[in-house]
Image (spheres, rainbow, N blue to C red):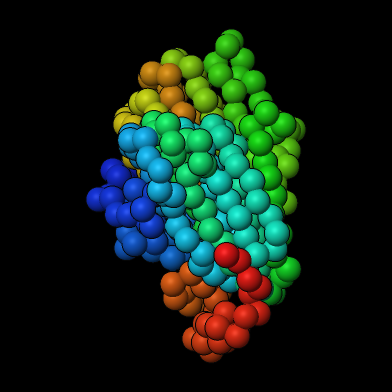
Amino acid sequence: MNRTVEKIYPAPSFHWVGNGFRVHNFFPSNTDIGMYRMSPYFLMDYASKHEFPPGNEPRGVDVHPHRGIETVTIAYHGKVAHHDSAGNSGVIGEGDIQWMTAGAGILHKEYHEKEFTSKGGIFQMVQIWTNLPKKDKMTAPKYQELTYKEGNKYELPDNGGSMHIIAGEYMGIKGKAETFVPTVLFDAKLNKGAELKLDFPEHHNTGFLVVEGNVTVNGNNKVEWDHFVLMANDGSDFIIKAETDAKVLILSGEPINEVIVPYGPFVMNTKEEINQAYEDYRSGKFGHLE
């Protein structure tokens, strides 16, 4: 049975995260989606294309804590540098992914890579937070560096483009990301006229972001650049067709049916756990990061 389109959302008004990330929050601030409708995904911040002039001062977000989630950062234009209190650091470029499991608690900072800052240029990226189940909230922090070059890809027939299988599986090809619940994250580059056939369990929450170009869904729903499509939970399969060359980020996953209590950078299950997170942060249990 075909999965239908529930709603198409244009990019909401942007806000700044630090001084380097000019983002549109598709959820959870959008009450239609909220904290649960795209579970296990909790948050999507989309930095649409924006040109930064050359500069000398660092641009980004200074040291901040996380607990109870994973942060997934995907670069499309520009370069993002990352550092955390577990000693992980790196730089991601076009198509690369930083997948950080905050788990029990970590300090983190992310910023434009130094050379990119000095030269300036077009910047575009997506950051997603995936919720962790209660049983895994206090897992040890870890970091997965998932480069486009070394990632597993599916080549569409008839020169239709390619899709980076980041998490989950497509046509027998498995993504390299390790996840705590069944989760799909595909980054597709589609050539004009290509059709991408997708099939996920009906109860899995599913949506996609058009990062570039224009597409149609199931032949009759037109979707423009910088729009997010929420798919209904009324079927399993659907088709995305590229009306122009297009880039599409596809999310799907098994919902975590637990109460969520978020506060700032923490996503937990009770107010008491939030209070404990702040106490642990203040007492230095998240480590140290300059």
- Residue in the picture at 62% in, 60% down: 84
Q: Position of residue 273 (x, y in %)?
A: 56, 84
Q: Is residue 129 above or below residue 193?
A: below
Q: Position of residue 103 (x, y in %)?
A: 65, 68
Q: Is residue 126 above or below residue 246?
A: below
Near-viewer residue (257 or 66): 66
- Residue in the picture at 61% in, 47% down: 98
The image quadrant of residue 55 is: top left
- Residue in the picture at 36% in, 26% down: 214
- Residue in the picture at 52% in, 53% down: 110
Q: Which quadrant: the C terminus? A: bottom right
Q: How many numbered circles does the render carry? A: 0
Q: Position of residue 78 (x, y in %)?
A: 47, 35
Observer able to see residue 17? yes
Observer able to see residue 168? no
Near-viewer residue (174 or 95): 95
Near-viewer residue (29 or 93): 93
Would residue 83 be found to the left or right of residue 259 on screen? right
